[in-house]
């Protein structure tokens, strides 16, 4: 399963990827808005939006790309390690 994480903290990127590996998921993490975000997202199975640490523009871009490839979208206000583990536990189980 491929996962794209939008938002979160820069210092947590390696931990987000490590957690995804524990659930046998490939992960891309975008904590900042880049010019070609839409192209970089690709065709994931799941998009996790950490809404507390992300701009509205970045959310709109991610949601549009997720809808194009029919990916599941999960929104979470908290960008913690435990929140990601709970999301992946519910989706990957």
Image (cartoon, grey):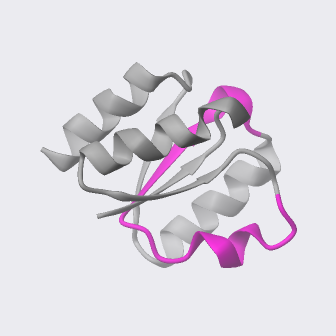
Residue 32 image point, x, y percent? 79, 48
Q: Is residue 46 above or below residue 92?
A: below
Magenta stretch, residue numbers: 34-54
Question: Residue visible at 71% across and 44% down?
Answer: 31
In the orientation shown, which residue stands out farthest toward the right?
Answer: 35
Vertical order, 42 against 59 (above or below): below
Instruction: Give whichever of 28, 35 is nearer the camera.
Output: 28
Residue at image point 46% right, 47% down: 17
**Quadrant where the C terminus is found in the figure:** top left
Residue 19 in percent (x, y) is at 37, 39
In the rendered image, residue 46, in percent from the top left (x then y), is placed at: 39, 57
Residue drawn where x is 51% and y is 22% of the image: 80
Let me know if residue 9 appears in the view: no
Determine if residue 19 is in view.
yes
- Up the image or down, 39 lies above or below 34; here it is below
**Residue 87, image x, y percentages:** 33, 35
Q: Is residue 33 magenta?
A: no
Specify whether 43 is left or right of 65: left
Check the picture and name the quadrant holding the N terminus: bottom left
- Would residue 43 appear left or right of 29 to someone viewing this image? left
Instruction: Identify which residue, 35 or 23, lies in the foreground.
Output: 23
Q: Hey, which quadrant is residue 18 in on the image?
A: top left
Q: Is residue 52 above or below residue 37?
A: above
């Amino acid at each position: 399963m491929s996962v794209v994480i939008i938002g979160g903290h820069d210092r947590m990127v390696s931990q987000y990827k490590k957690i995804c590996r524990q659930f046998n998921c490939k992960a891309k993490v975008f904590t900042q808005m880049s010019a070609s975000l839409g192209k970089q997202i690709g065709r994931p199975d799941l998009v996790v939006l950490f809404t507390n640490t992300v701009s509205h523009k970045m959310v709109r871009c991610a949601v549009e790309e997720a809808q194009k490839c029919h990916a599941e979208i999960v929104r979470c206000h908290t960008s913690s390690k435990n929140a990601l583990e709970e999301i992946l536990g519910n989706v990957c189980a």
